[in-house]
Image (cartoon, rainbow, N blue to C red):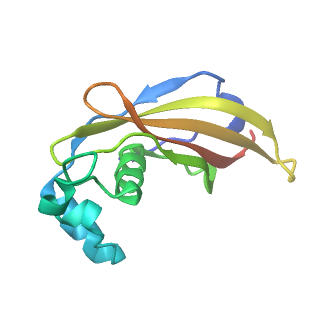
Amino acid sequence: MYFKSIFFEDYQLDDKRVTLGRTITETDFVVHAGHTGDFFPHHMDEEWCKTQPFKHRIAHGTMIFSIGIGLTASEINPEAFSKGYDRLRFVKPVFIGDTIHSEITISEKAEAKKPEYGTVTEHVEIKNQHGEVVLVCDHLLLVKKK
């Protein structure tokens, strides 16, 4: 991780970056359940899940979001602030042993309320090892102008 100043004017529509992968483990399921209190059987009960459509435990959507977004944090931009995330969708299930990575595309740029800033939208797709989108969202940034 390192610091890199990127100003509003430096962002180009359709620029894309791809993260490294991260394999989802049994430990991830247990730790996330402990952190959130979400011990629903869909995530924790393999035998019960055998009776359900996916036949295996499925990862917490919030865990995949957290890990997938964490993968994007490879550089610190001191000129930008995260305003949050919009249009978050859990598209496909993720299972223990799946490897996810994130693909980030600059999808929108606009003026901000304060003239010294602009807004940038990063469209984030989290994909599994088969290239299938498992989660999608838009990351909203407030970015300083030069």
Q: Looking at the image, is 145 positioned above or below residue 66?
A: above
Q: In the rendering, at what x and y percent does residue 24 appear? A: 21, 48
Q: Residue furthest top?
A: 14
Q: Residue furthest front?
A: 51
Left or right, 113 with respect to 108, comes to right
| Residue for point 36% across, 74% down | 36
In the image shown, does 77 or 120 lie closer to the viewer?
120
Left or right, 79 with respect to 19, comes to right
Q: In the rendering, at what x and y percent does residue 3 appear? A: 46, 46
Left or right, 102 with respect to 7, comes to left
In the image shown, does 7 or 125 lie closer to the viewer?
125
| Residue for point 21% across, 40% down | 98
Q: Looking at the image, is 72 positioned above or below residue 28?
A: above
> Can you tell which quarter of the image residue 123 is in?
top right
In the image shown, does 6 or 50 lie closer to the viewer?
50
| Residue for point 60% across, 54% down | 82
> Can you tell which quarter of the image residue 119 is in?
top right
Q: In the rendering, at what x and y percent does residue 121 appear? A: 65, 39
Q: In the rendering, at what x and y percent does residue 10 appear? A: 65, 29
> Can you tell which quarter of the image residue 137 is in?
top right
Left or right, 57 with respect to 103, comes to left
Q: Looking at the image, is 39 positioned above or below residue 9?
A: below
In the image shown, does 71 or 45 lie closer to the viewer?
45
Tally the marks: 0
| Residue for point 42% across, 52% down | 65
Quarter placement of the C terminus: top right
Q: Looking at the image, is 117 positioned above or below residue 99?
A: below
